Amino acid sequence: MKLQNFQLKKLEIIRKFLEFKAKYPQRLNRKFDLSWSIWMFGREPLERSLQRLKSNGIDFVELKGDSYTDEVCSSASRMREILKEFDMKVSGICGLYSQHNDLSSSNPYIRQNAIDYVKRQIDFAESLNGNYLIVVPSAVGRTRPEDNYEFDRSVEAMRICAKYFEKSKVKAAVEPIRSAEVSLIHTVDQALAYIKAVDHPAIYYINGDIYHMICEESNLGDAILKCSDRLINLHIADSNRDGPGKAMIDLDLAIMAAYLVGMNQEGRFITFEPLGPYADPYVLANSLPDESVMDNLVKESVRYFRQREEILREMDESEIQSLIL
């Protein structure tokens, strides 16, 4: 039977992966560092969130960017104590960009608020030894453009933010997000064009998200490969935005492509972020989670991901057909 186009593309990536394994076996010695974006746990105490992650073999946490003002913020010193208690490290900070801190806003005061917000999150991340800060070029939850100049305003604002990244060890990670959530930057190509327009060496990296990729890209594997060495973090959720293995996303394809671009190197992360089908998922940031649901979600997500990862690491030519069909 003749393969469909998407199967042919997967076959191409499988072969690249097998060639990579044969030529550079040492590059697969290290598995991915797994992280979890805990802003989806909302107002749950940090101790409970870290306990859940640690008990399921996760050693890194992506914190929410909630350092807003000197008084309305999380205590970095207290966080360091809790992180040490659970032997956890910070992968990075998930920046939260609403219409109040929109880098693309036509209102200069809102753009300044966005710049100030980014600066505070950089300082916050650095104080906790975080590796990256996710940057969203426009407000999440606003899908209609204000005008035709959003891209230009966001680029100008990001260029200002770049000087703060330049002084820090924290890396800017631009995230493409589906068009059902934002008005700007939906694909990897658009993220690359945005980074090129900013034209600053401190603005280089991409935060990928396989859920957004299957909504906006022609091929999940190609989108990851296109990121190349710019991909510093990859968010994981299934096609229904539940945990991996709960719907139709081709997790094998994502895992193989992630190995091909070196996502198993130190300082790069696979971060779970199964948020559910919200157009404005920030609603989760201020809610209390159902602990039993979250406990099962973490356990099942990690178990399934590691299972698929191990299958692919041990795969040989004889198993290609079983992965395609």
Image: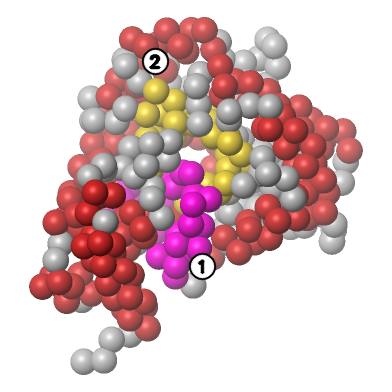
Residue 110 lies, in percent from the top left, at 82, 35
Question: Looking at this view, is 223 or 273 the one in front?
Answer: 223
Residue 59 lies, in percent from the top left, at 32, 27
Residue 31 placement, left or right of 176: left
Residue 100 placement, left or right of 178: right
- Secondary structure state at the residue bearing disc 2: helix
Give the magenta-colored segment's residue range.
219-247
Q: Is residue 91 depicted above or below 70 in this figure?
A: below
- Mark 2, Cα crowd under 10 Å, few <14 / some 14-19 / many 20+, is many
Q: Is residue 253 depicted above or below 91 in this figure?
A: below
| Label of residue 217 in the image | 1
Residue 63 lies, in percent from the top left, at 49, 27
- Secondary structure state at the residue bearing disc 1: loop
Q: What quarter of the picture does the C terminus occupy?
A: bottom left
Residue bearing the label numbered 2: 83
State the residue at coordinates (36%, 77%). 9
State the residue at coordinates (68%, 60%). 193
